[in-house]
Image (tube, helix red, strand yellow):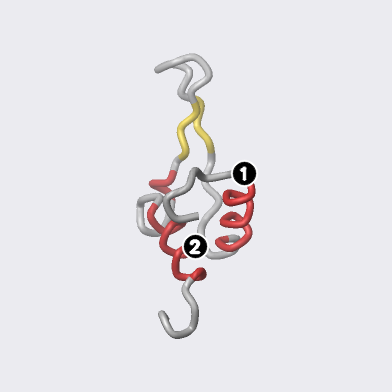
Amino acid sequence: MSGDLVTRDDVVRAAETIRGRARRTPLLDGSAIAPGLFLKAELLQHTGSFKVRGVVNRLAALDPSER
């Protein structure tokens, strides 16, 4: 995937990889800011940010010699 556009399959695969390792966070209605806007409440992660998802997904992709 490096350098390429992210596909739906990439997102599905990442979701399967991080399942059980990151909190499910709600989508909040942001229509007061803009119609159809939703905000992902990643501040509810243990780390307080979205980064846990990317880190877990990347670490899972490393081969044993890289770990």
Query: Which residue is at a point 45% across and 41% down the rendered structure image?
Result: 41
Location of the C terminus (image quadrant): bottom left
Between 35 and 25, which is closer to the camera in this rendering?
35
Disc 1 is placed on an element classified as helix
Left or right, residue 36 beside residue 34: right
**Coordinates of residue 50 in the picture (x, y in percent):** 40, 50
Disc 2 is placed on an element classified as helix
Query: Which residue is at a point 52% across and 45% down the rendered structure image?
Result: 6
Residue 8: mark in rendering: 1
Whether residue 58 is situated above or below residue 8 in the rendered picture: below
**Coordinates of residue 13 in the picture (x, y in percent):** 62, 56
Q: Earlier in the sequence, mark 1 or mark 2?
A: 1
Q: In which quarter of the image is residue 19?
A: bottom right
Three-letter residue code for mark 1: Arg
**Coordinates of residue 42 in the picture (x, y in percent):** 43, 46
Residue 39: mark in rendering: none
- Residue that mark 2 sits on: 57
Query: Which residue is at a point 41% across and 62% down the rendered structure image?
Result: 55
Left or right, residue 45 beside residue 36: left
Three-letter residue code for mark 2: Asn
Whether residue 55 is situated above or below residue 64 in the rendered picture: above
Between 58 and 33, which is closer to the camera in this rendering?
58
**Coordinates of residue 65 in the picture (x, y in percent):** 44, 85
Left or right, residue 53 beside residue 20: left
Whether residue 39 is situated above or below residue 3 in the rendered picture: above
> Label 1 neighbourhood size at 10 Å, few (<14), some (14-19), many (20+)?
few
Q: Distance between the residues labelled 1 and 2?
A: 15 Å
